[in-house]
Image (tube, rainbow, N blue to C red):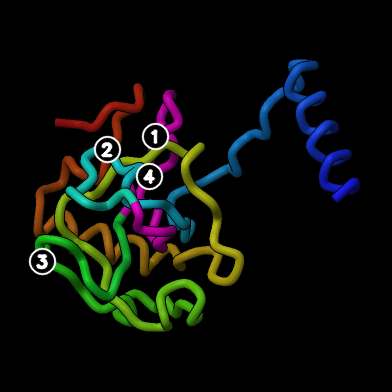
Amino acid sequence: MLHKLIIIQILLGAVSLGLPAPTPAPVVAGDIILARPKNYDNPMPRQGKVGYHPAVALTNPDEHGNIKVAPISHDHPMNPPTVPISQFNINLPPSEGKGIGTVNVATPATVHVGNVKLSKSVTRVEPHHLEALKAVIRKTCGDHVVRRSNNGHLDP
């Protein structure tokens, strides 16, 4: 009990000293990230208690730290168009998706890099598989959803 009290005092002291908050992990297009669906730009109702789910980062962060992602799940809400993750050579371990699942190829979600963690087991989708995933999304939703202009905004 004394150890916990000392740790709490140290943590509170660090907060009161104004030490900088930890910086989010750098995320680049192709990374497998873990995010809570409630942190997406337009979360579905009743997503508040859903834990971290894997997703593929489709873009690099914009100037505000937002990235476009293709969520991975074995049970997507609202039944969007999906493709098996095996089509893009994504092999998730049981701790991150039970080794199976589909990737949502409907309009990508937006999430801030401060609300994501990098996967510890599967780090990246190979570039040719990432381009294949983007091609499927473009075919489903249009080219503008996975391409950014130089100023970080989505191209029309």
Q: Mark 3 and mark 2 in contact (Cβ < 8 Å)?
A: no
- Mark 4 vs 1, N-terminal side: 4
**Crowdedness near tag 4: few (<14), some (14–19) or many (≥20) residues, C-alpha within 10 Å:** many
Please state which of the two labelled residues, at mark 2 or mark 4, is closer to the viewer: 2
- Mark 1 vs 2, N-terminal side: 2
Q: Is residue 145 left or right of residue 49?
A: left
| Mark 1 and mark 3: Cα distance apart in space | 25 Å
Q: Residue at x 54, y 70 (%)?
A: 122
Estimate the x, y position of residue 44 in percent, counting from the top left: 19, 49
Q: Residue at x 44, y 80 (%)?
A: 91
Q: Nearer the viewer, residue 137 or 34?
A: 34
Q: Residue at x 40, y 30 (%)?
A: 62
| Mark 1 and mark 2: Cα distance apart in space | 10 Å
**Crowdedness near tag 3: few (<14), some (14–19) or many (≥20) residues, C-alpha within 10 Å:** few
* Residue 139, above or below 88: above
Q: Confirm whether the magenta stretch covers residue 141.
A: no
| Mark 3 and mark 4: Cα distance apart in space | 24 Å
Element at badge 2? loop
Element at badge 1? strand
Q: Residue furthest front?
A: 1
Residue at label 2? Answer: 41
- Mark 3 vs 4, N-terminal side: 4
Residue 87 picture quarter = bottom left
| Mark 2 and mark 4: Cα distance apart in space | 15 Å
- Mark 2 vs 4, N-terminal side: 2
Residue at label 3? Answer: 79
Amino acid type, callout 3: Asn
Residue at label 4? Answer: 59
- Which region shows up in magenta? 49-69
Residue at label 1? Answer: 66
* Residue 61, above or below 139: above
Amino acid type, callout 1: Asn
